[in-house]
Image (spheres, grey):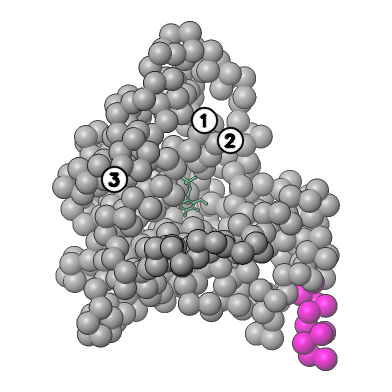
Amino acid sequence: MTKDLWSDNYASRANGLSASEVRALFAVVSRPEVVSLAGGMPFVPALPKERMIESFNTLMADRSNLALQYSGGQGDPILREHIREIMGLEGIKSNVDDIVITTGSQHGLDLVSSLFLDPGDVVLAEGPSYVGALGVFRARQAHIEHVYTDLEGISPEALNSTIERVQAAGKKIKFLYLVPNFANPSGVTLSANRRAKVLEICRKHHILVLEDNVYGLLYFEDRAPDALRSLDEDGVIYLGSFSKILVPGFRVGYVLAPPSIREKLVLANESAVLCPSAFSQMMISEYLSNNDWKAQIEVFRGEYKQRRNAAQAAMKEFLPDLTTTNPGGGFYLWVDLPKEINSKTMLPRAVENLVAYTPGTAFYGNGTGQEYLRISYSYPTPENIRVGVQRLAKTINEELSTVKG
Ligand code: PMP
């Protein structure tokens, strides 16, 4: 590492910035001989590129001066209309005025955190929770408090007792961060019954809910229960994205927030990026207006379901003694390892065996989670998923014989 001449000058919050374990893996997994079950890459080859080219040509022919210009800080009104319809598929009734377009939902996470988090504030999150969100909260010097989560999602009882414990210790809880549908990294979905209970508990304790729902429409059999936002308009900030249902490359996400919060979000958005990319927004609008986007989401569902099936079948074939979650949608399978194994220290052996995964430790703010790993099945072919899991099994067996001596 080169010496940092400016190390005395950083703001203290820069100490919270560190490369995530997923990011650090990217260099390794781009080697073609490695089967990557690590990063959650959307399967963009399934997109009809020729339709995208048509959208581009129409946009450039008809509205290039708008698409190539600065635009409003809240985002394109036509795209916001489309977003209203998309959110309606998950039971949400919204007003276009309450939607703010962001540069990916990751940016939405950052904007909300910039509005609410002071150093030392507490954020409640599922255990495990999305690594990219944990990174944002850490960068704001927040303390992450994980709440026990099982196959039905976050536990209402554990939520209540965690809130009481944290508040009794005199700490300020700013929000509960949830990925309620086909969660990253667990694949778990919060049951309808628990959704109502979680909201009731948060209302009682005056805690905002940050609902991150980027996978909700990617279900394989049954659709997920209605969004939490559909049950509570005042207490929930909702984050969505085009990254998984269309393209990540345009970097377009959105936030639906109660009006007072939305006003501040627009100001924070303007301060960060002036305006989200007009070009990206208008490309998406153009595509949505002239294509059967629901059929395209159906295509993605088929691709991911096939891959989920391949991952589960390979786990049964090569690692029949291990327990995994049973995702009804999304990109991820969460694997419970034999207790002797540490998924973080095992990773170099896996890479030697030409497979990559994400260690469970990436998904906890407190360094725990070594007894789990995340498999992402979204991008490799079903055949490569099988090969990857076979290599993972070899790695686990080698590791077990080493640790058991
Ligand atoms: N939330 C979750 C749960 C995610 O898995 C991701 C991407 N991996 C994001 C947010 C960010 O997505 P984007 O910024 O591309 O919308």
| Label 1 secondary element | helix
What is the C-alpha distance between the residues marked 3 and 2? 36 Å
Residue at 61 percent across and 57 percent down: it is 23
Image coords of residue 362 (percent x, y): 56, 68
Magenta stretch?
Answer: 395-405
The amino acid type of the residue labelled 2 equals: Val
Q: Which residue is mark 2?
A: 299
In terms of image quadrants, where is residue 5? bottom right
Q: Which mark is residue 212?
A: none
The answer to whether 385 appears left or right of 16 in the picture is right
Residue 348: quadrant of the picture: bottom right
Foreground label between 3 and 2: 3
In the image, 73 versus 350, the foreground residue is 73
Q: Which mark is residue 295?
A: 1
Label 3 crowding class (10 Å Cα cut-off): few <14, some 14-19, many 20+? some
| Residue at 53%, 79% in the rendered image | 368
Residue type beneath disc 1: Ala
Characterize the local packing of mark 1: few (<14), some (14-19) or many (20 or more) Cα atoms within 10 angstroms.
Answer: few
Q: Residue 162, image x and y in percent? A: 31, 80
Q: Is residue 390 magenta?
A: no
Using the numbered discs, state the Cα–Cα distance from disc 1 to disc 3 in whole angstroms: 35 Å
Left/right of residue 266 with respect to residue 30 in the rendered view: left
Between 126 and 390, the one lying in front of the other is 126
Question: Residue 208's spot in the image, x, y percent?
Answer: 24, 61
Evaluate if marks 2 and 1 touch, with contact meaning CB atoms under 8 Å apart: yes
79 relative to 224, above or below: above
> Residue drawn 66% across and 34% down?
45
- What residue is shown with label 3? 268
